[in-house]
Amino acid sequence: MNILSIIIVNYKSWGILKRNLDLLASYTFEKLSLEVIVVDNFSNDGNLVPFQSDFPQFNIIENTGNWGFAHGCNLGAKHANGEILLFLNPDTLAPKESLEKMFFAYKENPQIGILSCKQSEKPSSYQKISPSIFTLFGLQRSLYKLMFPQKFKETNCQTCQCEAVSPDWISGSVIMISRAWYNRVGGWNTDYWMYSEDVELSKKVKDSGGLLLLLCNVNIVHEHGGASRINVETSALTKTEVIISQHVYIQNNFSQIQKIPSQMLLIINTLVFKSVLGIIGVFLFFLPKARVQFFILKNCLKYYFSAIIHRTWISPKSEKFNQK
């Protein structure tokens, strides 16, 4: 029997996760068996045990802490028995036919390293540009767009006439990868707490000769948001982690000659723009969006101080940082 191991990392997204699991529990396949593994990143809110009771057919486990998306994915993979792994966000809803089409498309094409598909409710752009010294932040990307407009062509799977495309990298919300490829590239890099881990995973597979393929005629609904926008402080935290993940990506993937100037450019850009927005946030603190900017500045200053003291770009929220 063909086994597809679906791995879902959850953090306080119980509502949409229930819809996800209810849908998966309703499926029966002739040529495919689903193994569903949910890793709860220590939500610690009393919902784990009821979920384990409601879905006894699924393996729902608790992480030792909220060590981030990559860590949760790796923990789920350790418990998986299938030769093909599908990492899904909790806020996705996967139709039965989409799972079948993806699984057998992967098995039938030995060139594929990572497979994904169209995502809705929002348009799924596949013109994702891998980070470089020229595309780190807004001003650079604007100049890069002027020089290479074809790379930023506004195309997405809702308007594309192709059956499949090969993007620069594939979003971590829907990633299918074989156990062989997962082991070959060392799984997900837990240097990242949140964001950019999917970019690096895609890069490792691509650099090792694997094909990145996105099926435009297959759809999985991605409702977006999950637990990342619960309140002002949570929103500020996730937006700060975007910046932190960029520093980690630079350190892990840029050439030696590009690392220092890229890190400095990112620091300067962050401090200049976030300082302006953070100061405005002080005066407009009664507005939620303004408060978010204030907390982002506060978080970034704390992070840069930590990076100097501990001599690492790794997020202070990651397990690796806390093991030092």
Image (spheres, rainbow, N blue to C red):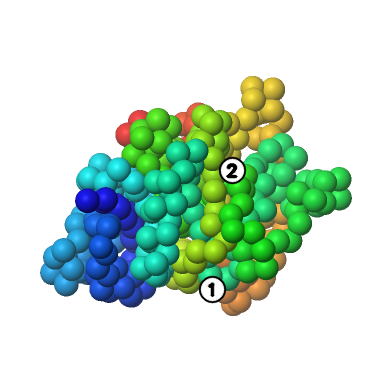
Would you say residue 272 is visible in this rendering? no
| Residue on which the image places disc 1 | 121
CA gap, disc 2 and disc 1: 27 Å
Q: Is residue 166 above or below residue 247?
A: below
Residue at 49 percent of width and 66 percent of height: 219
Residue at x-position 86% and y-position 50%: 146
Q: Which residue is mark 2?
A: 246
Q: Residue at x 82, y 46 (%)?
A: 148
Look at label 2 and name its amino acid. Gln
Residue 294, image quadrant: bottom right
Q: Position of residue 124 (x, y in %)?
A: 59, 63
* Occupied quadrant, residue 292: bottom right
- State the image coordinates of residue 271 (x, y, percent, origin top left): 68, 48
For image coordinates 36% across by 68% down, the residue present is 96
In depth, the one of 263 and 196 nearer the eye is: 196
Q: Secondary structure at mark 1?
A: strand
Give the x, y percent position of residue 196: 53, 46
Residue 18 against residue 201 in the figure, above or below: below
